Amino acid sequence: MYCTVYSGGYVGIEGFPIEVEIDLSNGLPQFSIVGLPDSAIRESRDRVRASIKNSGFPFPNKKITVNLSPSYIRKQGTLYDLPIALGLLGLSGVIDLEALREFVILGELSLDGTINRIRGILPIILSLKKEGFRRFIVPEDNGEEAAIVSGVEIYGFKSISEVVSFFKGEIEKLPIKPKPFESVPLRFDIDMRDVKGQALAKRAIEIAASGFHHMLMVGPPGVGKSMLAKRIVTIMPPLTFEEAIDISVIYSVAGLLDGTIIRVRPFRSPHHTSSDVAIVGGGQNPVPGEISLAHRGVLFLDELPEFNRKTIEVLRQPLEEGVINISRSQARVSFPARFLLIGAMNPCPCGNYGNPYKQCTCTPSQIKSYRSKISGPIMDRIDLKVWMEHIKEEDLLRAPEGEPSSVIRERVMRAVNIQRERFKNSKTDYNGNMTEAEINKYCVLSDDAKRLLSSAVNRFNMSGREYSKTLKVARTIADMEGEETIKQHHIAEALQFRSVESL
């Protein structure tokens, strides 16, 4: 006796169809699973046997062979428990095998027959939809997540008994209706009005949010670097549906999706002691790291020089290309990593270099060694660099309350809407991600702006990347003013952020 049940798997964030082939034959009772399963799948034998028996159904006392096809792809996870169990119940005559073949089945089983939540269900359904599959049986706890995908029928179940009753026609189950996507109202416990002073840094943060430009803040401890960084999400534009799906797929694979689509831009702030794999991603079965979990959002690296230099250098590719490629002996995967990098660092190991109120105790060699941890190529990829001065306590008390995030966000949105219209037929979304061809097309300079930029290139011996970064930032500043042509003062403002004066 033989049957095939459809299921699915994933590598990285790419899903693929799986055929769960089950054969029952005479011989000594045994249960084997082949087709490059990992240890979690091999353990399915015990979970499936116990869940079927404890649900009150007969378990076949025969030789059972399960093949996960295609056999050349390594399978991982516990999502094949349910299709194996239902296939065995079909071969035992409990449910109709032909009806079973109308569905793609995914789910992990408890020993009592309960169907547990699984990770990675969103990329599987998105990929299998492209293959022509339309009906899916999933754990009830994954139902809302799976229903994000339009054009498919998602049926959520909480136990094997409930699935069997559905196939026997004893209960009616309707497809889960997806909730309409709406960006949640942007309400935060923090606000830009909390930050007093630091006008230049606030301006840089607004430019960064408007055009998705990477930014580095340098200054003594306590000047508000972390405070500003944490508030950038309060002025960033709400997620579009496409952006929300991109993020949700990554969080689904990572097992961090709480049952519904991501609606707020992520803010990730890993500690500098985090391992390379935690930041970049990877492992035997590659999983997303912090740079991918920050996709479409903010990656804040506080105390940047304290991070492992190797980890910082790995950021080169994602900063430039918006993707991280991870190669392992078993697989090569790519994770999206188009994040907004916000870095913060002290000017020296003790933190007081350039502080007019405290004495720096570092030697020149210590300062040089500290700063050299951030290589030239990495600094070259950062669009905005700003020095933050220490502010006296009496000046802070006298400083007026700053602009609220809602007001700044309105200005940011005006610039973002201009970019969305500009790039509507392109893979680019923000000025910070423009290609060289797009820079040449959209960065039209006035004559005065051309002369100023030409003078700056010669004076500062700017690299090609610095030149492009300056044009991208100037394009965003012009968009913030609603200007089609980049003017001299736009270039001048962009140039002031190309280096940190005090370093």
Image (cartoon, grey):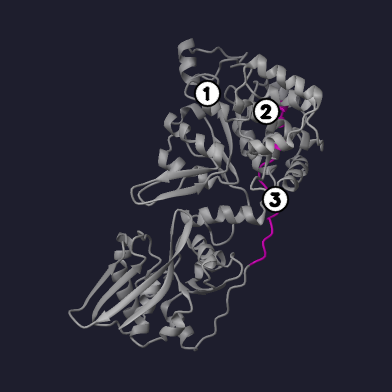
Instruction: Please say whether residue 195 is one of the residues in the magenta stretch.
Output: yes
Left or right placement of residue 50 versus residue 497 in this view = left
Figure check: 455 above or below 274: above
Label 1 or label 2, whichever comes before in sequence order: 1
Q: Which mark is residue 425?
A: 3
Label 2, on which residue?
470
Relative to the observer, which residue lies in front, 292 or 363? Answer: 292
Q: N-terminal of the two: label 1 or label 3?
A: 1
> In the rendered image, is residue 235 in sight?
yes
Q: Considering the numbered disc 2 on the image, is that residue within a helix, a strand or a loop?
A: helix
Label 1 close to label 3 by CB (< 8 Å): no
The correct choice, above or below, for 110 with respect to 362 in the image is below
On screen, 470 above or below 423?
above
Which residue is under mark 1? Answer: 376
Disc 3 marks which amino acid? Answer: Asn
- Any part of residue 263 in sight: no
Q: Residue 272: within the magenta?
A: no
Badge 3 element: loop
Magenta-colored span: 179-203
- For the residues labelled 1 and 3, the Cα–Cα distance comes to 34 Å
Q: Residue at x 44, y 69 (%)?
A: 106
Kind of element beneath mark 1: helix
Residue flagged by tag 2: what amino acid is it?
Thr
Marking on residue 210: none
Residue 165, percent from left and from top: 46, 85
Q: CA distance from mark 1 to mark 2?
A: 16 Å
